[in-house]
Image (cartoon, rainbow, N blue to C red):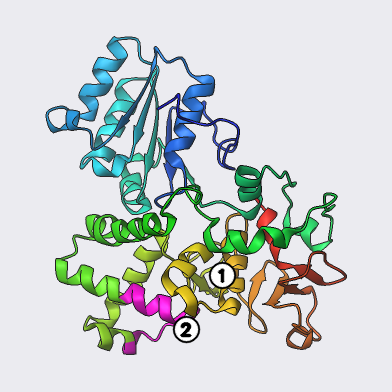
Amino acid sequence: MLSDTPVGFHRYMYDKIDWSDRLIGLKGPRGVGKTTLLLQRAKEFLDRNTTLLVNADDLYFTSHTLVDLADDFVRLGGKVLMIDEVHKYKEWSRELKLIYDYHKDLKVVFTGSSILDIEEGEADLSRRVVPYEMQGLSFREYLRMFKEIELPKLTLDEILNNKLEMPAGFHPYAYFNEYLRIGYYPFSNESQFERRLMQVVNKTIEVDIPQYTDMTASAIRKLKRLMSIVSESVPFKPNLSSISQVLGISRNLLPEWFVYMEKAGLIMQLRDDTGGIRGLGKVDKVYIDNTALMYMLGRENTDIGNVRETFFLNQTRVMYDVITSSVSDFQIGKYTFEVGGKNKTQKQIAGVSDAFVVKDDIEIGYQNVIPLWVFGLMY
């Protein structure tokens, strides 16, 4: 596995993790590259004689526990234990707590394809684990990984002040539309990408979410139907009463299902500011999680206006709290954003301070007009 692991490109999370911590949890949706990140760390910095990577659904665990493994590993001189897809191990949270308490000199790093079970388990580990959450590729990472084009990482203020110096000969729209269709996932250059992405969606709905919620087979079918409703309608203001009637489930159950889908990386929910910073305010709109997922689900019916809004929200949410705007599309702190094509006017934000028009199909910005693609350089 190490010999097959490339090290020329690192995801944004690689340098954000404090690898000196004793217990690290890397969360995130399926398919965003968590396993590769662990292998890169092992290949570049760790002693192979004292490092072990295991998958939590290995047959070894049919007759052994994680605690057994850690005990044996430490006795043999082990220093770093990496556990991939830890959510597949039933008692993972309780046993990691024991390992942390028993083995003071052992560092443990674990990943979970479903962020749902990871968050459920953190209650026992909250004072011990240092959690990180990783999303898919930014446009900047996509250019670096697949096109070998280096662009600088920009803060929101740098973007709004048009600080980007465009590399000579670089034209973003030679690559941007391809990114929107397939670029969010690191496996986008592999054969049968669309089929693999559909497998990610199916496993998330059929395995990850039910594993967390103890859903019945009937409920899983209704969850699939809900995903279909979302994909055909996004972005939309959720009418819980009408959706509950269509699905034949309680109206009170729907907000929970939407949260499960959001945490699992299937949808994004745009909230207002009633919940405070990073709070759970009232949901204003529901979006598909990323543009690649949009195109896979919507195919030829995918609306470009929805794609633009989805890209903006998907890329900015990683570093900033994004909420709905009372006068426009989005708000980040004091800034208001109206997203559209190159013919989008200033009418919607006339008289609004700190307001910007975000336009697709333009290469460079001017005054309060910002190119849409530049928001893909934030991580």
Per the image, the residue denoted by label 2 is 237
259 with respect to 364 (left or right): left
**Picture quadrant of residue 217:** bottom left
Image vertical order of residue 229 relative to residue 120, above or below: below
Q: Is residue 31 magenta?
A: no
Tell me how far mark 2 sits from mark 1, CA to CA. Answer: 14 Å
Q: Please name the residue shown 77% across and 59% down the image.
A: 159
Q: Judge depth for marks 2 and 1 and give the one in front.
A: 1
Callout 2–callout 1 Cβ contact below 8 Å: no
Image vertical order of residue 45 relative to residue 168, above or below: above
Q: Which residues are magenta?
A: 226-242
- Under mark 2, the amino acid is Lys
Pointer 2 or 1: first along the chain: 2
Q: Is residue 227 magenta?
A: yes
Q: Please name the residue shown 36% across and 50% down the image.
A: 119
Q: Please name the residue shown 59% across and 66% down the image.
A: 311
Given residues 48 and 185, the one toward you in this image is 185
Q: Secondary structure at mark 1?
A: helix
Q: Secondary structure at mark 2?
A: loop
Of the numbered discs in the image, which one, if any, rests on residue 267? none
Dot 2 alpha-carbon crowd within 10 angstroms: few under 14, some 14 to 19, many 20 or more: some
- For the question of whether residue 284 can be seen, the reply is no
Place of residue 141 in the rendered image (x, y in percent of width and height, measured from the top left): 62, 47
Place of residue 375 in the rendered image (x, y in percent of width and height, measured from the top left): 69, 60
- Under mark 1, the amino acid is Thr
Per the image, the residue denoted by label 1 is 310
